[in-house]
Amino acid sequence: MLDYNKICEGTSYYKTTAETYFTNRLKSKIKKLFDKATNNPEKRHNILDIGCYIGTDIFMLGLGKKNIQFYGTDISKEVIKRAKMLTKFRNVKNVEFKVSDSNKKLPFKDNFFDLIICSEVIEHLKNPSKFLKDCHKKLKKGGSLIVTTPNLGYPFIKFGKLINVNKFREQEFTRIGKTITKEDWDEKGHISLMNNKELFKLLKNNNFEITANEGVSIFGGNSFFDYHLTALSIMILLDSIFHRFKSLSHGILISAKALK
């Protein structure tokens, strides 16, 4: 597997025009599911973001809500250090960050969380089923799990090969002080890719009831689009129409309820 501490020493995530678009589409869909899961102002909610990076999603979701306690975990000591620095800088009181390897048990007691967010993490894990079992234990009865992951069944892979997008992808993995190759990321990083049907089945087998299942965007973050703005405009137009179709999506989004 990749050494995620080394990856996160510099600027962890590549940013292209298309990646920014894809990320914003993804985050907006997570935000809608989050708001739905925490719409009771009279109830206290414990929320966990697994693979939280520097707390990006947590800070986005609304730390001002006094009835919500946030927790964030990440395998990288470096990004948790930065998350804690940002928390102190923003004078935020209702969030805690911990270093945790999601290949191992989550460092929390059972039946504790009302919502767990696991965005773009499960594809990096050795045993996704074992991970989902642990998530189920940590959730209260009826608690929700939001999972997002790249779609192994993405239908436009052949088109990507036709226009040789890998030539552009090499540029996306340059970090401060080092280069992570495409092969490293794909072969050592994305070790548990699934299509929508496989993830759907895996959740059901681990005692989750699916409550939402939709696509994220019909294209991902390849820097090919930074050099072909006409193609980017066409893809954004098409995406505004077809982004909900999970069979066409570059990414999968599933929300599920924990059955006890």
Image: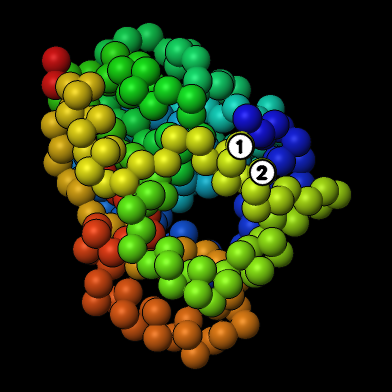
Q: Indicate the position of residue 104 as horizontal and vertical percent values.
A: 50, 15
Q: Amino acid at mark 2?
A: Asp
**Quadrant of the drawing holding the N terminus:** top right
As rendered, which of 61 and 193 lies closer to the eye? 193
Which mark identifies residue 216?
A: none
- Which residue in the structure is indicated by mark 2? 184
User: Quick check: can you spot residue 109?
Assistant: yes
As rendered, which of 33 and 190 lies closer to the eye? 190
What's the distance in space between the residues labelled 2 and 1, CA to CA? 5 Å
In this rendering, the answer to whether 5 lies above or below 166 is: above
In terms of image quadrants, where is residue 223?
A: bottom right
User: In the drawing, does residue 20 fall left or right of residue 65?
Assistant: right
Identified at 29% across, 14% down, the residue is 137
Q: Residue furthest bottom?
A: 230
Identified at 20% across, 33% down, the residue is 201
In this rendering, the answer to whether 54 lies above or below 102 is: below
In terms of image quadrants, where is residue 117?
A: top left
Circles 2 and 1 in contact, beta carbons < 8 Å: yes
| Badge 1 element | helix
Q: Indicate the position of residue 139 as horizontal and vertical percent values.
A: 27, 20
As rendered, which of 151 and 40 lies closer to the eye? 151
Identified at 38% across, 49% down, the residue is 152
**Quadrant of the drawing holding the C terminus:** top left
Q: Residue furthest top?
A: 109
Identified at 56% across, 21% down, the residue is 100
Which mark identifies residue 188?
A: 1
Q: Residue furthest right?
A: 177
In terms of image quadrants, where is residue 43?
A: top left
In this rendering, the answer to whether 167 lies above or below 95 is: below
As rendered, which of 184 and 124 lies closer to the eye? 184
Mark 1 crowd level (few <14, some 14–19, many ≥20, 10 Å Cα): some
